[in-house]
Amino acid sequence: MKNGSISVNTSSIFSVDMPYSERLKIRRTVYRGGDGPRVSIVAGIHGDELEGLYVCHLLANWLEQLAETNPSALLGSVEIYPAMNTLGIDTLTRFIPVFDTDLNRSFPGASGGALPKRIAHAILSSISGSSLVIDMHASNIYLREIPQVRINNEFSDKLVPLAKKLNVDIIWIHGAMTVLEATIAHSLNSMGIPCLVVEMGVGMRITPAYCNQLIKGILTLMKHVGALAPDFEIVKPDRIPVIADDTNVHYLNASTSGIFIPDIEHWTDVSKGQLLGSIVSTFRGETLAEVISPVDGVLFTLRDYALVYEGSLMARIMANKES
Amino acid sequence: MMNMTAPVRESFNIPYHDIGPVESNPAIALVSGLHGDEINGVYILSRLVHFLKEVEKGSYPKFKLVKRAVIIPAVNVLGINTLRRAWPFDNTDINRMFPGNIMGETTQRIAYSVLETTKRADFRIDLHSSNLFFEEIPQIRIYDPGPETVKISRMFGLSTIMVRKSSPVFTTTLMSSWSYWPGHNFLLQIGRAGSIQLDYCQRVFQSIMDFMGKIGVISGLQISESDEETFVFQPSHSVNVYAEKAGMFVSDKTVGKWVLGGEELGYIYDSFNGDVISNVTAPVSGLLTGIRRHPMLFEGDHLLRICRKPE
């Protein structure tokens, strides 16, 4: 299919027989305008995260309009991979069904052997050669996240300048952890392909405002790497991200079990000693615990799933840094 | 071991046994049921507790419990009771949460308590089964071992010792966290998850008894001289066979038998029309140490592990 001078092609990058009669395919759509840089947009590595799927749709829609109105503005290509864990998304399963394996702990994978490794290998093979990769995640079903980029400090010099253009609210630079070496982002960044990990929203839901916010950032980065013509006008980003790191992110874990009722909106400024919410009993009228902010800062993670166990994360606050 | 509140149930705990003379540190710590679907270990350890308590009571006058043993038959209590491998509330694998954190997530708190309860033992053993799909010969797994660890692992008298390399993915396991403490660590891999394979359990029960006799936890035991030879298999001895095609895998072979290169070990059928798609044969001669038991196959699924005889 040809759309002006932008070609559009949906095809499978991996295909394998299933035990009974069906075939599993992992598909992508490539919008190609010219020989310029490739930008790859990845979503659905976890089958219960949907925010990125809608971003894929919005971007595809934008590119199809561009094909009608100004196809020559696309100098490179955009590859959209909405559903890496295809079978997980179709069966509402976070991990790869049957194997119960986290696809994002299976990289770099292998060309043979068990399915998760093969899928990981196929994804990396398909994506390598990109100038930029954006891997979109939607937290999990428990926590709501403000749009943010998470960066392993091993790669922060290269990635922070890019992340600043992605129109998110926070950039969180975290320490290197050995287990995270099996993520797609670590594999790509180790190969020298910059990969930004976005976390936003909450599992099993779509937050259109966050998706529209991220699109502005994706277009800005597409232009920055040269996939879009330099003189092509795009909507300007409207966020200046704050930088969080392991010294000013505070975790609020539940001191007891019960149901958590927040007293505050997500993504608001909080002050030290402020009541953020309560853990209450379901058998009695009592409040079991109060959740109090330990610092002055901004609440960027808030529990969405009300039931909490002792230890469950309820909130994360980025403390204001001394200026 | 720890007491924890639950959202709508009463508080729960993870009970464990502390048996034998109270010394500063236990001589041995045994853990199973980090995964709620691995039942062999729960059976073996609960029966071991029964035996040790009988010894303590004097029911076996010849035997004496000389040293302290700490035994946790099941860590993932809620998983055992709801037939779930991972921690049921958030599907977290407890064996990926070590070393844990007393102030962290629920499963990090559980991991922290397990490590605190067991880390000071001289010998530490973590019992596992494979998963619902694959059956493993009862084996001792040791990671990047020195010669002393290999020597001690022979004291179990099990026929199969597998030397493995540690990998970044395993840094958050109990075995890996133990390795920072003085002492010796062994992982016993027994059969498959979801059911009890009684003959394997009996063999492993005997080998743990022998081991406890040899390290002096129980005195008066007649150490059984194993009539089986022990093989130490390096990673290079393992040959894995993967499914070339999807379908149904059926085999009548039993684990623990020596097979010949070229020998037919099973079939893959097309599960829609019943055609034989593939004859699965042994690529090399060796000991059949693992076989797939769940029939439904994706292409690339692990079917067999054959270990070539070490020279």
Image (tube, rainbow, N blue to C red):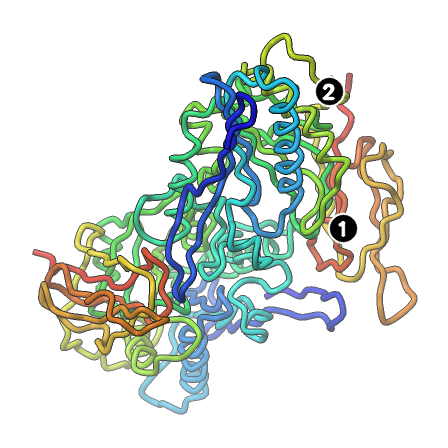
Give whichever of discs 1 and 2 has the lower sequence position.
2
- Identity of the residue drawn at 83% across and 31% down: A296
Task: From the viewer's perspective, tell me whether residue A51 is left or right of residue A103.
Answer: right
Q: Is the C terminus of chain A in the top left, top right, bottom left or bottom right quadrant?
A: top right
A303 in relation to B295, above or below: above
Q: Which mark is residue B44?
A: none
What amino acid is labelled 2 in the image? Pro
Q: Nearer the viewer, residue B111 or B263?
A: B263
The picture quadrant where one finds residue B63 is bottom left
- Identity of the residue drawn at 53% across and 24% down: A6
Q: Nearer the viewer, residue A99 or B288?
A: A99
Identify residue for label 2.
Answer: A237
The picture quadrant where one finds residue A60 is top right
Of helix, strand and loop, which one carries label 1?
A: loop
Dot 1 surroundings within 10 Å: few (below 14), some, or many (20 or more)?
many
- Identity of the residue drawn at 42% across and 56% down: A23
Task: From the viewer's perspective, tell me whether residue B258 is left or right of residue B76.
Answer: left
Residue B184 on image: x %, y %: 34, 56
- Identity of the residue drawn at 25% across and 54% down: B163
Identify residue for label 1.
Answer: A304
